[in-house]
Image: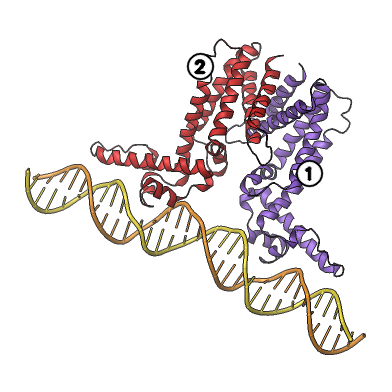
Chain colours: A purple, B red, C yellow, D orange
DNA sequence: TGTACATCAGTGAACGCGCGTTCACTGATGTAC
DNA sequence: TGTACATCAGTGAACGCGCGTTCACTGATGTAC
């Protein structure tokens, strides 16, 4: 409960605060590493403690439970993903809107390839845990959507806001699906450059009407 | 090992065979029910035994382990899904190829809606279990792809086989993504009819070039 | 058909493991005077 | 600055639960003669 607020309200004792924050950081770092290597299933309390250089019990002085900690990693991952997608648009103002969408989608593909387990956990997690999705999660998602909406405004100027909203979701979900199934070597075995071709196929059909 | 072959080779003792087959059937039925209600995570040996009316140990006279049993359920699910998608095409010969794709996709959406957990397990599973995906799984998947390929032949007559193959995967993955994220109330909350609109948006853009 | 024996499906108590979480305790850090 | 006391971060052994799988045993089914 106290853990829900990132910092204790205590006025004095900032050394304690700092230690606490450092421990928290180490634990999130450790959790990220474990998820990166083996997915959410690989996050075990004893490994976290060992990697963060603390005892088993110390984890519970910083987080209420392991789920909360995994959620903290998801927060980081989402911010990184957002940054990568945003970066794909720098200096792209002069490009055709379709091309901007392609860059965005390829950035998404790149992120999912490079941080596969972290990226999967972003979507795995909200299925496994009960209760509502945290606000920041939905906000981060709609920030991703915002990037897509803009080029769509150029491609479909006649659409209503609501229609464009649906189109945004449609494109995001489509690209997500292509990346999700495409990166699964067990059922797809489509090489990376073919995936880019697939993304292009999809988005160019949309753009060149 | 012996369990891998569906029937024992024994010439005589067909009553034993029959009992065995019946037990197997009951167990698969039970597993399907459990997955339907609570997803793959809800499949517990003790529940299976209770529901199938046998003892705990009996399970292991029919299946090597619970994973093998879940895989058997996936086999059934895949066949049902295939049938539903195929059924969406009966009497659709006269329709435009785009419209045929839409029907197929809506049939897919319908199946995923109605049998949500069974459908999710189809794709969850191959991530959780080690080892290669069984042949029949990939065959069933490519049978689904075959349905898509045909309308595409009409829409893109100039494409090479390989390109059309990629386009097939692209469309399947896209629709899969729309359904996957769309049916997740936690992050999407898009009502059913909006999902159909999204599918139409996607496929009509593809068709009306 | 009947008897003796062999085979095998089916039983369920018990094993064993993994693992999240707790809690009585300790030692360090801060506060009061 | 120094002493006495209070607070709290951090410890790790132990708890407790869930659950897949095994195995010595039993009773039913089939076979041989």
Instruction: Say left or right for B116 vs A68.
Output: left
Where is B162 relative to C3, above or below? above
Residue B152 seen in the current view: no
Q: CA distance from mark 1 to mark 2?
A: 47 Å
Q: Residue at x 25, y 37 (%)?
A: B14
Q: Nearer the viewer, residue A144 or B138?
A: A144
Q: Quadrant of the N terminus of chain A?
A: bottom right
User: Residue beneath label 2, please?
Assistant: B90
- Quarter where residue B200 is shown: top right
Where is A100 relative to B153, above or below? below
Picture coordinates of residue C7, whole percent (x, y):
24, 47
Q: Residues within 10 Å of mark 1 (few under 14, many from 20)?
A: few
Q: Residue at x 40, y 39 (%)?
A: B4
What secondary structure is marked by label 2? loop
Task: Pinpoint the chain carrying mark 2.
Answer: B
Instruction: Say left or right for D12 vs B118.
Output: right
Residue A198 seen in the current view: yes
Where is B91 relative to C32, above or below? above
Q: Residue at x 69, y 32 (%)?
A: A173
Instruction: Say left or right for A137 vs B146.
Output: right
Where is B103 relative to B22, above or below? above
Q: Which mark is residue A80?
A: 1
Picture coordinates of residue B193, whole percent (x, y):
64, 28
Task: Pinpoint the chain carrying mark 1.
Answer: A
What secondary structure is marked by label 1? helix
Q: Residue at x 25, y 36 (%)?
A: B11
Picture coordinates of residue A7, whole percent (x, y):
81, 61
- Quarter where residue B2 is shown: top left
């Amino acid at each position: 409960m106290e853990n829900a607020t990132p910092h204790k309200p205590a006025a004095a004792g900032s050394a304690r605060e700092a230690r606490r924050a450092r421990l928290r950081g180490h634990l999130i770092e450790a959790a990220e590493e474990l998820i990166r290597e083996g997915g959410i299933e690989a996050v075990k309390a004893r490994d976290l403690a060992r990697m963060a250089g603390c005892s088993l019990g110390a984890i519970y002085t910083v987080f209420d439970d392991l789920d909360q900690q995994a959620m903290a990693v998801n927060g980081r991952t989402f911010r990184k993903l957002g940054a990568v997608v945003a970066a794909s648009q720098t200096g792209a103002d002069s490009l055709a809107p379709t091309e901007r969408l392609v860059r965005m989608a390829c950035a998404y593909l790149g992120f999912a390839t490079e941080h596969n387990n972290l990226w999967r956990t972003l979507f795995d997690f909200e299925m496994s845990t009960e209760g509502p999705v945290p606000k920041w999660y939905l906000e981060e998602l709609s920030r991703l959507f915002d990037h897509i909406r803009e080029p769509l405004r150029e491609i479909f100027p006649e659409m209503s806001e609501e229609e464009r909203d649906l189109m945004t979701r449609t494109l995001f979900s489509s690209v997500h699906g292509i990346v999700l199934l495409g990166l699964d070597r067990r059922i797809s075995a489509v090489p990376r450059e073919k995936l880019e071709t697939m993304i292009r196929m999809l988005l160019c059909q949309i753009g060149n009407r």
